[in-house]
Image (cartoon, grey):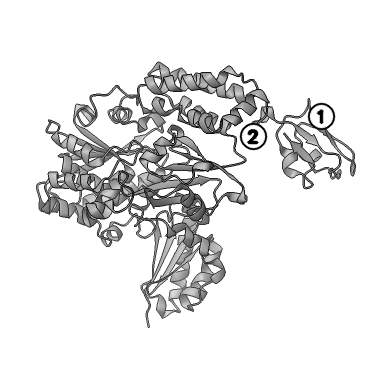
Amino acid sequence: MNKHIEIKVCTGTGGIAAGGLEVLERFQTCIEQAGLKAKTLTGCLTHRVGCRGLCARDVLVDVIIDDQKFTYQYIKPDMVERIVEEHIINGNPVSEWLVTEDYLSFYNKQQKVVLAMCGEIDPEDIESYISHQGYRAIEKVIKGMSPEEVIDEIKRSGLRGRGGAGFPTGLKWEMARNAPGDEKYIICNADEGDPGAFMDRAVIEGNPHAVIEGMLIGGYAIGAKRGYVYIRAEYPLAVERLKKAIEQARHKGYLGERIFGTDFGFDIKIKLGAGAFVCGEETALIASIEGKRGMPRAKPPFPVQKGLFGKPTVINNVETLANIPSIIIKGADWFASFGTEKSKGTKIFALTGKVKNTGLIEVPLGITLREIIYEIGGGIEGDRRLKAVQTGGPSGGCIPASMIDIPVDYESLARAGSIMGSGGMIILDETDCMVNVAKYFLQFTQSESCGKCVPCRIGTKRLLEILERITSGRGKEEDLKKLEKLSNDIKASSLCGLGQTAPNPVLSTLQYFRDEYEAHIFEKRCPAGVCRDLLTYTILEEFCKGCGMCLKVCPSGAIIGEKKKPHKIIPEVCIKCGACFEVCKFKAIKRG
């Protein structure tokens, strides 16, 4: 008796990096070979899918037999033949390779809306998307709803921009709809540049058609006939799959003229960005599409009034647009049932840092940081102590461990001195120096400043110089006041959002971790043992066994001593690299 068999292999960026394409090819080869001797394999479907979420377990593989699903983790090509032989042919799952209970706990508190089809459909096959109600939302809209009704539905859903600012999406569409002008544009901002963020990339890699359909609906609502996807060239897989999706949508008649036989026509062009962080700011993005240098301009006028080529323009990010089809199909009330009173729906986060389960998550707004870190994330790596959570990327702030019971929504994060941002969430533990963290983000924003306005161009440079002075042991008492005043001045006077939010990591770490700044300045000590210039290494004679390991790895020849006798470190020769500290098995080296 033939069985329905389906095999899904993760080929998002993380999956491919772990060998997903080789695993997929191996499955196809083994299935073809086994099919000659097993009738049950007739019609077996093996295909790629996008990011499954728990990137730390890649390559993830689903084996579905008659609607019974088994998920395998850490799969390599040489493991495939056994899975095919024992599980698919003989019906005995390879239990030691299946996911464990902590894998399931990663998903228990998630609510997938945008990511619902990522990991389920083949992102390079439009028929796979169509089989999951794909392009039914745009059909419903253009055949049975007026633009005003569409906008009202989005307004009632409470959807806010997922790119960071959280502006109501329906209101933005309404403003563009009402703006005078026959020619209008809608732009998808896929210029994701935050360190540690990969939300937009994963959505486009896993379900590009949802973004296209969201743009179609937005174009119909505001009266636009053309859209642009502004995506960074550093995302080659996302770009490739987006191009394929657009071509397939054109071939099916979902893009172009007279869509679904109506008078509505809409098409999409891709514009590759060169990776400038400032081009995530909407006016700088518009300038880049127009062929100019990506630099922001003063507002008003806002893009909904005067945007691309001087025409009314709506700019939404990837996640915002990918929400639209589900809202149209399932209704505004359904979407608004998730989240809080002012922050409706779900939010995707890239969960990274010192957490056991790193990956992509989608949670209802209002969930607490504690639930994300300890229930979804599985706790702190190495069971160390949580120190802080950094949200919002370079524009965000650091929330201390004492506040991890706050709900994750726009208002609560803002009150805590951070922002939602596009969805970066970095977990920091006791081995992280908060002064160094602030310096890291200032290095990023300072180098990414376009230089157009003095507060950002010069102010971030001065902030960085002060932080570098403090972490090198040359900090002064007056530096604390300088950091605060300069940060507030930059926030108040910078031209665009990059400069206005650049001081957030400094201000939040000063607010919650002032003791670490003071230890650096007054005690010339880094409590976390991170800032090299403030470290000293000493060998404790009572613990040293004279094994010689530290002597072997020391790159500067700073360690002396005879075998089986206590060694010594010559301070003036030591370059404070920490190699000796890492290799000592007897905890005989003190770092302080």
Badge 2: few (under 14), some or many (20 or more) residues near its Cα, within 10 Å?
Answer: some
Hey, what amino acid is under mark 2?
Val
Snapshot quadrant of residue 303: top left
Separation of disc 1 and disc 2 at Cα? 21 Å
Residue extending farthest bottom: 1
The local secondary structure at tag 2 comes to: loop
Q: Which mark is residue 570?
A: 1
Q: Name the N-terminal-most of marks 1 and 2.
A: 2
Q: Nearer the viewer, residue 583 or 89?
A: 583
Q: How many marks are shown on the rendered structure?
A: 2
Q: Nearer the viewer, residue 256 or 540?
A: 540
Task: Residue 135: give x, y in percent of width and height.
Answer: 22, 55
Local secondary structure at mark 1 = loop
Q: From where the camera sits, is residue 193 visible? A: no
Answer left or right for 589 relative to 244. right
Looking at numbered disc 1 in the image, what kind of residue is underneath it? Ile
The front one of 192 and 75 is: 192
- Residue 269 against residue 376 in the figure, above or below: above
Mark 1 or 2, which is nearer the eye?
A: 2
* Screen quadrant of the C terminus: top right
Residue 62 location in percent, x, y? 44, 65
Q: Which image quadrant is residue 337 in?
A: bottom left
Residue 588 seen from this side? yes
